[in-house]
Image (spheres, rainbow, N blue to C red):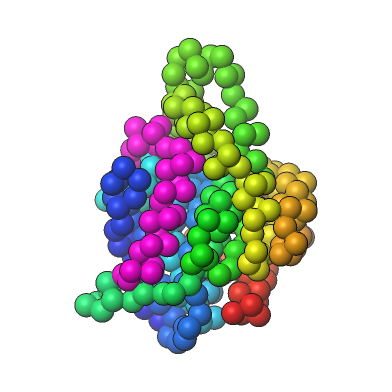
Amino acid sequence: MEIYQNLVYSGSDNRKSPFDLYLAENSADRPLVVFAHGYKGFKDWGAWHLAALAFAEAGFDFLKFNFSHNGGTVENPIDFPDLEAYSENTYSRELEDIETITNLAASGIEVNGKVKSWKKVALIGHSRGGGIVILHAARSAAISHLTTWASVADYGERFNFDMDAWKKTGVTTVLNGRTKQEMPHKYAFYEDYVADKEKLNIETAARKIDIPWLIVHGDIDEAVNFEEADRLKGWSKYAHLIEIQNGSHTFGASHPWNEIEIPKPLKKVVEETIRFFALNA
């Protein structure tokens, strides 16, 4: 296995952002697995590195990346040193980023003086990232497999702010309970969603999915109700839903994750996803 950390791509608005690449010893013609993190997330959060290792050990090349405006930087990809960039983020920017990553996989990534490319990409998206990978999979012929972990089903429902006050001040903040930062969202975030409402409609995209799709959701998810997984499943005849027992929103993981073992619920998620990708390869 080869591991390359903090490689750099140019995302939305040409903002540079890091990604990690795990190359399996023998991935043959299997697709590259691309992982998209969720809200207030990043590629190095919690036990995502252990999940990446598990996929590579199972014979899948694996790429995890930071969205370009997630608040991280190339120099400090963990947590949120750049809240100004964070405040500029939108769903459209994240969709642009994952399109860039998919194109990068097709054109090739240079590591150790060699260029590695992939004909197909399998997507995994967690939480808010689940919606992004659904939107992208419905638009891109390069996507061969889709898996969503604790995914949201509707972005419009996530705007549970005081909308009048937000519009008046131009910015609202959400407390990050772990870092104690006030995470800013400019009103332009909502305006971007309204302007591209159809393009960002997860249900519309889900109904277009015609590739193998695994939906994984925990039975005790405290952030995204299991009912949203049921809705996703109902929108596509290609989708298969697995309920994870004792599965929280992050499947038992937290940040930082200093254990050498992956938490049991997340281990089950990873095992089911690897099995799904392998069976449908």
Residue 143 lies in the magenta stretch: no
Queried whether the magenta region covers residue 87, the answer comes back as: yes
Q: Position of residue 194 (x, y in %)?
A: 54, 30
Q: Which residues are magenta?
A: 80-109
At x 77%, y 53%, the residue is 234
Q: Please identify the dominant SS of the magenta region.
A: helix
14 and 140: which one is in front?
140
The location of residue 83, given as percent across then percent down, is 37, 34
Q: Residue at x 43, y 85 (%)?
A: 25
**In the figure, is residue 14 to the left or right of 197?**
left
Front residue of 117/209: it is: 209
- Residue at image location 53% in from the left, 14% down from the top: 165
Q: Quadrant of residue 215?
A: bottom right
If the image is split into quadrants, where does the N terminus sit? bottom left
Do we see residue 28 in this rendering?
Answer: yes
- From the viewer's perspective, tell me whether residue 112 is left or right of residue 72: left
- Residue 98 percent coordinates (x, y): 44, 55
Q: Quadrant of the C terminus?
A: bottom right
Residue in the foreground of this view, choosing between 12 and 86: 12
Residue 240 located left or right of residue 44: right
At a point 26% along the width and 79% down the height, the residue shown is 114
Q: Position of residue 196 (x, y in %)?
A: 51, 36
Q: Is residue 79 visible?
A: no
Q: Is residue 150 left or right of residue 230?
A: left
